[in-house]
Image: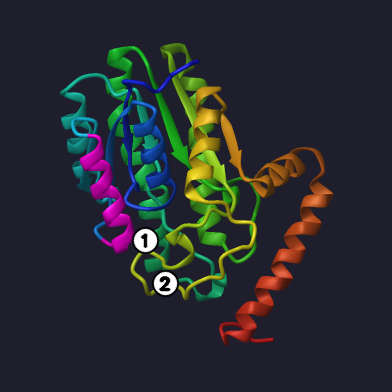
């Protein structure tokens, strides 16, 4: 049985909760050395899970607080890890969500969302690429979203960040291929995470309803690692994301129908909440 992650050094940002935490659990179970990082703002259950991982995998599980918007802090963090040996996988996963009418978004919100969802990825990649070039190998895995491959209504800011992550990742994939460095853009659909509960500062938007089709973080981690192992460039996760990715390429008219339906539903939701006029 192939064990591609056994003994490999993996850095995962945004791993105090959500998909990042699911990846950390799965990678540690497969024998990887995992460096977790994330916000201090996480729920008690996730804190307990992280503490349990540190206890169960001594010398293989590490955790610290990290603000990916801080380029210097990110560079120092990754350099410290690389001082101990090669970095095999860089999972740039930290992210925050936003669903609201564009007319209600000010530049401060743009700065917050792009700071984490786009510049957080850029800071990680900027720091790790020179190290991977020197060691002669590596795999960069950037978490985008289905909102990075289809234009989800009322998520204009989030889409702007995630489309940028997908384009950035795809461009790098071709550029770094000659140097034995792989790049994957992960594009999840609905995953049951805190992204539906809050934005960056708990004030950007109200709690969103959890989609019925949302998969768990452990399921998401399995799909992601399967795609990473296969060397996929763009990796849709969940049936919805895969269907939308297929539609955008082969059946744009069908995709248009789905997006218009979503737009109607979400518009009514915002009207009901008093955030849009009829």
* Residue 127, quarter of picture: top left
Please tell me which residue lies in front, 48 or 196: 48
Residue occupying the point 27% across, 55% down: 48
Q: Which mark lies nearer to you, 2 or 1?
A: 2
| Range of magenta residues | 41-57
Counting residues from the start of the chain, the first of labels 2 and 1 encountered is 1
Neighbour class for label 2 at 10 Å: few (<14), some, many (≥20)?
some
> Whole-percent x and y of residue 47?
27, 56
Verify whether residue 42 appears in magenta. yes
Q: Is residue 42 visible?
A: no
* Left or right: 10, with 76 as reference point: right
Query: Total number of numbered labels?
Result: 2
Task: Work out which residue is located at the far front of the displayed protein and give it.
Answer: 56
Verify whether residue 68 appears in magenta. no
Inter-mark Cα distance, 2 to 1: 10 Å
Residue occupying the point 51% across, 48% down: 162
> Whole-percent x and y of residue 41?
28, 62
* Residue 261, quarter of picture: bottom right
The dot on residue 51 is: none
> Whole-percent x and y of residue 114?
41, 54
Q: Is residue 44 above or below residue 59?
A: below
The dot on residue 112 is: 1
Q: Is residue 91 visible?
A: yes
Coloring scheme of the render? rainbow
Q: Is residue 102 above or below residue 4?
A: below
**CB under 8 Å between discs 2 and 1:** yes
Task: Identify the residue under disc 2.
Answer: 204
* Left or right: 96, with 124 as reference point: right
> Whole-percent x and y of residue 204?
42, 72
């Amino acid at each position: 049985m192939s064990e591609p992650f056994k003994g490999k050094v993996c850095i995962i940002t945004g791993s105090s909760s959500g998909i990042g935490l699911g990846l950390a659990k799965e990678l540690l179970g497969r024998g990887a050395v995992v460096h977790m990082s994330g916000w201090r703002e996480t729920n008690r259950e996730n804190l307990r899970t992280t503490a349990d991982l540190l206890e169960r995998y001594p010398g293989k599980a590490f955790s610290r607080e990290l603000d990916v918007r801080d380029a210097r802090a990110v560079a120092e963090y990754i350099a410290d890890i690389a001082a101990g040996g090669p970095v095999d996988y860089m999972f740039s996963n930290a992210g925050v969500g936003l669903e609201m009418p564009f007319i209600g978004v000010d530049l401060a919100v743009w700065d917050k969302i792009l700071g984490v969802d786009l510049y957080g990825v850029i800071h990680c990649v900027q720091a790790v690429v020179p190290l991977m070039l020197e060691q002669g190998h590596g795999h960069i895995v950037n978490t985008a979203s289905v909102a990075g491959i289809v234009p989800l209504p009322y998520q204009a800011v989030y889409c702007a960040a995630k489309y940028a992550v997908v384009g950035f990742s795809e461009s790098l994939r071709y550029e770094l291929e000659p140097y034995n460095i792989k790049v994957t853009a992960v594009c999840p659909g609905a995953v049951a995470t805190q992204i539906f509960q809050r934005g960056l500062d708990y004030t950007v938007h109200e709690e969103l309803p959890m989609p019925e089709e949302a998969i768990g973080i452990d399921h998401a981690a399995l799909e992601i690692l399967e795609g990473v192992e296969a060397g996929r460039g763009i990796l849709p996760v969940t049936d919805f994301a895969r269907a939308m990715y297929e539609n955008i390429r082969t059946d744009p008219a069908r995709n248009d129908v789905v997006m218009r339906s979503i737009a109607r539903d979400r518009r009514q939701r915002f009207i009901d909440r008093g955030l849009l006029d009829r």
